[in-house]
Amino acid sequence: MKRILIIGIGAGNPDYVTIQAVNALNEVDVFFVMEKGIVKEKLIALRKEICRRFIKGNDYRFAELSQT
């Protein structure tokens, strides 16, 4: 069965990610990221850093969607 998980990044500091969020991150195959322009580019980088830091292995991918 396919599921959609909505995982909050809290205050935006990778040190504040909860164990529940880390467990959820490790269940995901595809992360959908909304492209919101240059102003929000740092948020996408932060999300990718959180994934790099907390996901075991690298069998996940990002699908970037543009907001039009």
Image: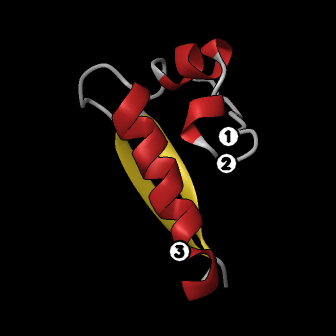
Question: Residue tagged by mark 3?
Answer: 41
Question: Residue tagged by mark 1?
Answer: 9
Residue 39 lies, with reference to residue 20, above or below; the image says: below
Residue nearest the viewer, comparing 44 with 28: 44
The amino acid beneath tag 2 is Gly
* In this rendering, the label closer to the viewer, 3 or 2: 2
- The residue located at (57%, 32%) in the rendering is 15
Quarter holding residue 61: top left
Comes first in the chain, label 3 or label 2: 2
Q: Taking 18 as reference, is 25 left or right?
A: left
- The residues bearing labels 2 and 1 have C-alpha atoms spaced at a distance of 6 Å
Residue 63 lies, with reference to residue 57, above or below; the image says: below
Secondary structure of the residue carrying tag 2 is loop
- The residue located at (65%, 78%) in the rendering is 67
Q: Quadrant of the C terminus?
A: bottom right
Secondary structure of the residue carrying tag 1 is loop
Question: Residue tagged by mark 2?
Answer: 12
- The residues bearing labels 3 and 2 have C-alpha atoms spaced at a distance of 14 Å
The amino acid beneath tag 1 is Ile
Secondary structure of the residue carrying tag 3 is helix
The amino acid beneath tag 3 is Glu
Q: Position of residue 34 (x, y in %)?
A: 60, 65
* In this rendering, the label closer to the viewer, 2 or 1: 2
Quarter holding residue 10: top right
Residue nearest the viewer, comparing 15 with 44: 15
Q: Quadrant of the N terminus?
A: top right
Mark 2 surroundings: few (<14), some (14-19) or many (≥20) residues within 10 A: few
- The residues bearing labels 3 and 1 have C-alpha atoms spaced at a distance of 15 Å
